[in-house]
Amino acid sequence: MKIRSLPANLTLMLYLLTAAAACSANEVATKTLEEKVSESDLVVSGVVGEILPCGTIDVGECSKYSVTAKVLVHDILKGTAPKEILFRCKESIPEFSPRACNPGVKYLMFLQQDGKGVFHSVNGPRGIYSLTEVNEK
């Protein structure tokens, strides 16, 4: 029995398809509005205030790659919340990070609370929406 090798073009295409699949492995799927609301402990609009370093009493231990902010709550659309919450505005895994660490910016937030009192986006970058135009800050 004779073993045939794949043509170079086909081998390259298979390699690229495999690499592309690996690159998108951590991609966060977009949830519907209904899923975001359903999975949220809290849905609020609020303004990002002070950025807190890891290890502070408020934040507790976290990754050196994550960032937590205090958020002044303006409107509560689901759940109950104090006037100020702790929000993980940057997660240690980039694909899950809402990238919402801009003091003075108002966001609509779909949030889940962890066991330590810190809130996280239910859908990574697709669970937080800026309500402030850049020139409004």
Image (tube, grey):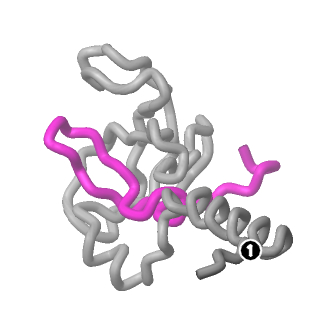
- For the record, the magenta segment spans 109-137
Identify which residue, 77 or 4, lies in the foreground: 4
Quarter occupied by residue 94: top right
Q: Quadrant of the N terminus?
A: bottom right
Identify which residue, 29 or 133, lies in the foreground: 29
Q: Residue furthest right?
A: 9
Where is residue 39? Give x, y as percent. Answer: 26, 71
Left or right of 124 in this view: 24: right
Query: To which residue does mark 1 refer?
Result: 6
Left or right of 47 in this view: 75: left
Left or right of 45 in this view: 59: left
Identify which residue, 90 or 132, lies in the foreground: 90
Quarter occupied by residue 19: bottom right
Q: Quadrant of the C terminus?
A: top right
Residue at 42% x, 42% y is 72
Q: Residue furthest front?
A: 1
Residue 8 falls inside the magenta stretch: no
Left or right of 82 in this view: 34: right
Where is residue 127? Give x, y as percent. Answer: 47, 64
Q: Is residue 72 above or below residue 67?
A: below
Residue at 17% x, 36% y is 116
